Image (cartoon, helix red, strand yellow):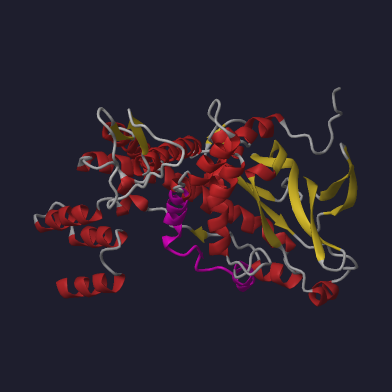
Amino acid sequence: MMLTANVSTPSAEASALAPMLEIIDDVRAGLPRMRQRSSIYLPRYQNESADDYKRRVNLAPWRSEFVDALRTLTAKPFSKPVTLGPDAPEPIIRFTDDVDGRGNCLHVFARRFFESAIADGCALLLVDYPKAEGIRTVADEKAAGLKPFWALYPASSIISLRTARIGGRIEIIDARLCEVVNEPDGEWGEKSITQIRRLTPGAWQVWRESKPGEWQIIDAGETSNAAPQVGVNAVLLRTGEPLGDWSCRPPLLDLSYVQVELWKSLSNLAEVLEYSASPMLVARNVQLDSSTEIKIGPRFCLQCGEGGDWKYVQPEADNIREIREHAKDVIADMQRLSMQPALVRPGATATEVGLQAAKAHSALEAWALGLRDALQTALQRTIPFMLHDDRRAVGAWTPVVDVHHDFGSEIGRNEEARIIVDSAKIGLVSKQIARAELIRRGLLATSAAEETAAGAA
């Protein structure tokens, strides 16, 4: 029986993206989630008992290489604060001290936004405004103390996005986003409710499931102060290879696959080491009766008659070594895929390290520039929602956000510094250029540069 499509029906893009996001979400959730879904990621052996399988799953070690790689990549642009341009108006500065209404400043929110986009390939930033009932005048607006806020929606929350070209730009004209809200349940309890927010230019709706397969609108309204020339007040940040109008192949998808492979490899290693540490004792041509007590240990002696023999059965050392080396190879693959030049395999040449670093930071630089543009667009979309006096104070200001993205200056900078200094000594570059390059690489403070220039003069 075919079910009728409703507001919860995902678009073709969302359906295609869902399996990719599922494994990434599971890997990010860590060991407890992976154990819950072990039938998928660590399958049961044929004829393996339920107890033995459960024990094997619970003993399988977990190394969160994926999460470490994600955090390393995310942290790079935020080694320096995300700041506004020097001419930012006071209302904008106040807003960026708490952009989401939860006390998170622009820098903190931007980091969460960036991490979500790297993990899933894309993320959505929604510029929203509290429901304003009874607000009729500027005085009412001031008394209520309402202010715009930003909300983050990961790719897994996007049910559908439709886009169109408006004023020369591709804008979102219809969005369906999944939300989970917590509401009181009795005097002490709490329940989680899934709802869907639908956004169109100038309007919004909230849908909830009344009974299985049937959804109804429980709240709706107009978007106050919405800019007429744009679509939905949302900004999409993409880091992956585009799959459609909005969806992307997550850039770390292959890394998530190898993370699962690493879990299997470490499970095999743990299992073989356990067998090796607790070998089976085998008796050959030894007559034993039911009353015989066998004691094992350094102070006990096992006796047998003529032709008898005792020995241990355990995995061969070569097998253990092979399994351990395989686990190391998997980790090396993860380090390569995570684009972390500091974690390349042992024995790599300096040239290999430099090339891998340049490739990683080149991709990361593009993502950081995309984040900067997204934040600037979000600020532009925020201005129409500000209090009347604040909007007047902002005037015609054009948002400028500074996000650190010059990672190329950090690659081999000590060696480059020596080359720069030597080049200045023999006159290949001027002292001014040399100073500027040293400052760009963080090897010379501005004040020190000025003192050096003064001394040279």
Instruction: Locate residue 296 relative to residue 158 in the image: left or right.
Output: left
Instruction: Locate residue 407 relative to residue 51 in the image: left or right.
Output: left
Q: Which residues are magenta?
A: 68-96
Q: Nearer the viewer, residue 45 or 289?
A: 289
The quarter of the picture where the N terminus appears is: top right
Q: Nearer the viewer, residue 196 or 371?
A: 196
| In the image, residue 87 lies in the stretch drawn in magenta | yes
Say if 63 sits above or below 456 in the image: above
Q: Nearer the viewer, residue 304 or 274?
A: 304
Residue 245 horizontal/vertical position (percent): 64, 33
| In the image, residue 129 lies in the stretch drawn in magenta | no
The residue at the point 81 percent across, 55 percent down is 223
The residue at the point 65 percent across, 67 percent down is 394
The residue at the point 66 percent across, 71 percent down is 393
Residue 373 horizontal/vertical position (percent): 54, 51
Instruction: Locate residue 79 relative to residue 3 in the image: left or right.
Output: left
